[in-house]
Image (cartoon, rainbow, N blue to C red):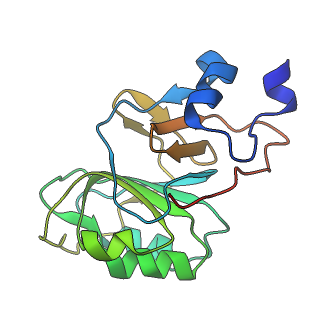
Amino acid sequence: MASEQAPIRPGESTADLCDRLGPLARVCGAPLRAYGGLRQACAPVATLCAQGSADGVRAWLEQPGEGRILVIDGGVPEHALLGDRLAALGLANGWRGAIVHGAVRDVAALAGLDFAVLALGATPRRAAGGGAGAPGCTLELAGVRVAPGDWACLDRDGVVFVSARPGWETACSTRRP
């Protein structure tokens, strides 16, 4: 099967990935907007069910990211779970980006970071502390199941999730617009 031989091709668009992988490509239908300076990325994901608290986000981004993308189910869209400081922390620790099913803040500063940030929206209101959430959870974004180790590929067209398979260590290249 061709998709088993070349699952992730460097620089491949999400549209081409969908065409090639067909039903293996799970398109996230959530109305995510791009806020970070990195507009194309493809990497394995780590997951967090944040339950409205940014504490778990900080805890994850303090760890070595190893080129991964953190996928966060925020639970509360009225409070930002990620801002410029946490994104800069993630970038410094080797994370490639974050996909937030919730809100972010510090939008102007996020645009200047070489870090992919997608979120449902923005708000100046910071999330309260209150727990680490559930790291490593399997979550659902607009009907798409996302598990730790899945791959997220994103560009200006949207986000595609693909279940990990043996030999999928080659990530897409990343480019700024």
Query: Which picture quadrant has residue 74?
Result: bottom left
Residue drawn at the location 35% of the way across and 71% of the way down: 110
Query: Which picture quadrant has residue 57?
Result: bottom left
Residue drawn at the location 64% of the way across and 34% of the way down: 163
**88 up-or-down from 43: above or below:** below
Q: Nearer the viewer, residue 82 or 110?
A: 110
Percent of width and height locating residue 133 = 35, 61
Q: Nearer the viewer, residue 90 or 8?
A: 8
Residue drawn at the location 24% of the way across and 50% of the way down: 75
* Residue 121 visible, this orientation: yes
**93 up-or-down from 74: above or below:** below
Query: Which picture quadrant has residue 18?
Result: top right
Percent of width and height locating residue 9 = 76, 40
Q: Is residue 9 left or right of residue 72?
A: right
Q: Is residue 72 left or right of residue 131?
A: right
Percent of width and height locating residue 89 = 46, 81
Image label count = 0
> Quadrant where the N terminus lies?
top right
* Residue 53 visible, this orientation: no
